[in-house]
Amino acid sequence: MAQLIRKLGSVALLYFSLMPLRPVFALNTPEKKEQFRQMKEFALWNGTVFTTAGNDDYTCSASKPCKLGCCGSVDKTTGKGVCGLGPDFCGDGCISTCNEKSECDPGWGAEWSLASNCPLNVCCSRFGFCGTTVDFCEGKIVSSPQCPGGKSADKRLIGYYEGWNLQRPCGTMKPSEIPLGWYTHINFAFALVNPKTFRIDPMDAKTASLYTEVTGLKRRQPGLEVWIAIGGWAMNDPGPYRTAFSDMAKSEANQDAFFESLISFMQRNNFDGVDIDWEYPVADDRGGIPEDFDNVVTMLRRLRQRLNETGRKYGLTITLPASYWYLRGFNLVEMEPHLDWFNIMTYDIHGVWDRNVTSIGPYAYAHTNLTEIQMGLELLWRNNINPGRVVMGLGFYGRSFTMKDPNCLDPGCEFSDGARGGECTGTPGVLSAAEIVEIIKNGANVRTDETAAVNIVTWDTNQWVSWDNAHTLKKKVEYANARCLGGTMVWAIDLDDGTLLDALGSGLSRPKDPVTGELRNVIYDFETVWPEEKPA
């Protein structure tokens, strides 16, 4: 099983987190041993040491309770109990931990299960665990949207602009240098939610000074929309902002303070909409609480109402993860009516953090593998989300590794750390598209995985990065069109020197929008930051 998980990469991350077990009591059968390995993977993913105290054979007793499941009746062969779930293990004859319940109900009743159904409508196996592979679904197939020859995704191309990019030593992009014509929307990343007042905080004064420079681009490209993205991964890192989203969403008074500040912020800086980038509700490892599941829906419903009351058509979206583990904290069905669309982050599926995920480990995989992107989108189709309200993420950067063995450079080979940081981005484990282009110019080896629609670039014996070029981006856009999606989005505008954008745009079925004038001729009449909005 471990070998299978390594081969499948984040297929394991997305779906092998919850594996089935079967009520077979003979310990020595290959089938039973395999089932226990699956239970162990489930336990490891959930942070549980599955083996019983001082024992690795998955047997148990009154003095050696199961770490996962109930200690079932005595096995006739070994004279020991066996760990499992459901009435066969937790019912008559159970020795210890007899109150454990399965994750979902495969038909044995609520008495033995925590819930009747699985989050996100994934399959409940006959052994009481949730997942999406054949082990759980037993022939049930997800129906994906089909638009052969469609062009729906071509109509919307969103680019995120990193407001802090000017702090890099090189490879920066001023607002005046943002390439225009192909982007229909620019999302300015990021502003924050003040953890005390719940009003809008700029990330810093330098980033805030760029707001109206970016919104001013609309004068050069009529029809362009510029939105503000609120949050981002770092906002939910340990620190003063970690619980700001949860605290804001838990009461109407706090929501109202946020709404008032947000609308004022957008009006003063001429933004056209807001993208809520909360990473992630409910997830306790990201500062979330269980109440977030319902509170986010309430917050979005009330925010949509408040935006409509302004008399201006402000846009409202939310950013989604592509992994089951985090996506299950989003009430997709109840959110959808209040949103213009969902932005799903179908990138960063892999990275150096995989070494801390026991079910995957320190093995290099491409972070934008199209096969895994498809699996992430299937979580939306399980909930009948309108594909026209789904925007698929693309990466103008790569996730990189230093490989442990220079003779093993294929996907699935072991890495020792992130690759060396780039000259401009300076962060081990990530390289901008512009940096990768320079590496290739200097003689790196490039291989294309047509099935995964990714490129693997290797250089300097042990350096490895996955990224998308014009060819693989085209394949991803074709996939988005074939699935009837409402557009694509790019992280991030400033990580590309314009090469990838031109390649991406030239493959669209719509013409490039006309761009007029120079940014320096624009006279701004909007305030950048208003006096009452100061960083905490």
Image: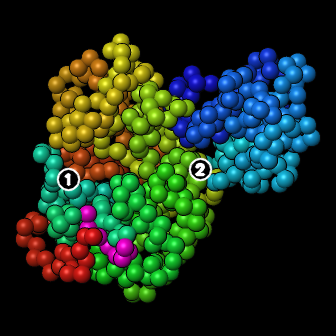
The quadrant in which residue 315 appears is bottom left
Q: Residues within 10 Å of mark 1 (few under 14, many from 20)?
A: some
| Residue 279 vs residue 345, the one in the foreground | 279
Magenta part of the protein: which range? 196-203
Q: Is residue 525 above or below residue 390?
A: below
- Where residue 482 appears, as percent x and y from the top left, is 51, 47
Residue linked to disc 1: 165
Q: Residue furthest toward the top?
A: 407
Q: The residue under label 1 is which amino acid type? A: Asn
The quadrant in which residue 266 appears is bottom left
Residue linked to disc 2: 379
| Residue 88 vs residue 74, the one in the foreground | 74
What colouring does the structure picture have? rainbow
Q: Residues within 10 Å of mark 2 (few under 14, many from 20)?
A: many
Q: Is residue 289 above or below residue 410?
A: below
Q: Is residue 48 above or below residue 460?
A: below
- Where residue 488 appears, as percent x and y from the top left, is 40, 53
The quadrant in which residue 88 appears is top right
Task: Kindly identify which numbered label has been placed on residue 509.
Answer: none
Q: Residue at x 88, y 18 (%)?
A: 77
Q: Residue furthest toward the left?
A: 521
- For the C terminus, the image quarter is bottom left
Q: The residue under label 2 is which amino acid type? A: Leu
* Residue 198 is inside the magenta segment: yes
Q: Is residue 479 left or right of residue 37?
A: left
> Gap between marks 2 and 1, in whole Å?
33 Å
Q: Residue at x 48, y 60 (%)?
A: 342
